Amino acid sequence: MNALSPAGAQGFLERYDGLRARLPGEPATRAAAADFFRARGLPSLRDEDWKYTSLRLISETAFQQPPPIPDHSTALSRLPALDAPRLILVDGHFRADLSKIPAGITVENFSVSENFDTQTRPDRDPLVALNTMLTEGGVRITIPAGHDGGLLMLASLATASPGLTTAFHPRHAITLAPGARLTLVEISIGEGSYLHNPVTEITVAEDATLTHIRLQDESPEAFHLSTLYADILARGTYENFVLNIGARLSRTEIHARLAGAHGIVHLNAAQLLAGTQHADLSTIIAHDAPHCASRQTVKHVLTGRSRGVFQGKIAVARGAQKTDGYQMNQALLLSPESEIDCKPQLEIYADDVKCSHGATVGELDPDQIFYARSRGVPESEARAMLVRAFLTEALDTVTNEPARAVLEHAVSAWWERQAA
């Protein structure tokens, strides 16, 4: 441990104490979050929601402030060729000079806002508290009523800092007014060793539709801990797809609340892991209104000594009659040393509902590989074909062609790295 930069929770608290006079936003909210984090610390394996994911490496690491003038050129060159307006963050800071803001929508730096939003619970979630006390920016996106925002890319770039392990905590807010539409492609990439701890708050108003595609392709030395809260009002639709392929340790946590009748939530995902990677996808869908539907299809492809985690909870409130909820988690283990932990949950207080969940774990079928090889297909290609077929059901939920192409390219690049 560096005496000037304590590790773990103490290091974060000392950073807050040093920055608190200069941090934007409401100081009372930050101070309350810091008090909770000081008493609570980082989550541990003793916490039920974290029983499969240890933050020991983070608690033992001394994180530094990112450099004031980072070199973003290499990270910027890794962005996919997506023909769309873009919002760029570098080490957690919104860079208007690198961004191209589309007409008709409002984009502002989160740090200029006077108050934090209220969906998240910094008094209950240590990672949200950590973000609340240390965030220095992010983006606030607002789509006006009836407007179609089209396709928009939100990219977070982490820059290499030789000899340093940095940390940044961006805060994002996305609001769709009644009847608005947006397809948002969110990409997280970087270089070097760092912690990326974003918190996102989403509101989808009546008759609005948000399609949210997320690609987490962080540096192999990085930690990625993201928390998202979404409220979906009457007849609103929130479609979320997550592809996790990067970071040595990642956790994607999603809280989606169906707050109005006839709302729809889709939380689909794929996790492709190798080496000693650990990726945790934890979701909670709260059906708080009647006549709502939710769907989840989650796929894992694990090789090496990697470990995947899926915790999915569907909670149906007493008044949420006519709920239709479905959840499926499937894992493909390509190595005898890989591991999957799955914890599906149904918590139902209404009596007129249709809810189901399932989980499967398996290996590639040797008969299918033999069949392909008997027809002249090399074994590596046969394995790749079967893996892609396994992932197709999850990827097919992404219907926007440019966004789907970004995911397809990322999957192909991941497989090529495993075959090399």
Image: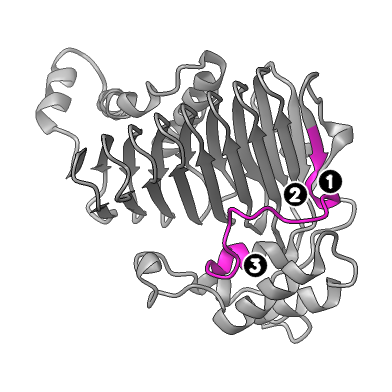
When the figure is inspected, residue 340 is found, relative to residue 129, above or below; the finding is above
Q: Amino acid at mark 1?
A: Asp
Name the residue tied to disc 2: 159
Say which element carries label 1: loop
Q: Amino acid at mark 3?
A: Leu
Q: Amino acid at mark 2?
A: Thr
179 left or right of 191 in image: left
Q: Earlier in the sequence, mark 2 or mark 3?
A: 3
The numbered mark at residue 71 is: 1
Taking the spot 68% from the left edge, 53% from the top edge, the residue there is 117
Q: For residue 46, what is the image quadrant?
A: bottom left
Taking the spot 62% from the left edge, 73% from the top edge, the residue there is 61
Tell me the quarter of the image containing the C terminus: top left
Say which element carries label 3: helix
Residues drawn in magenta:
107-129
Name the residue tied to disc 3: 130
When the figure is inspected, residue 250 is found, relative to residue 328, above or below; the finding is below
Residue 248 placed where, x, y %?
51, 56
Q: Are marks 1 and 2 in contact (CB under 8 Å)?
A: yes
Q: For residue 10, what is the image quadrant?
A: bottom right
Say which element carries label 2: loop
Separation of marks 2 and 3 at Cα, in angstroms: 21 Å
Q: Earlier in the sequence, mark 1 or mark 2?
A: 1
When the figure is inspected, residue 53 is found, relative to residue 80, above or below; the finding is below
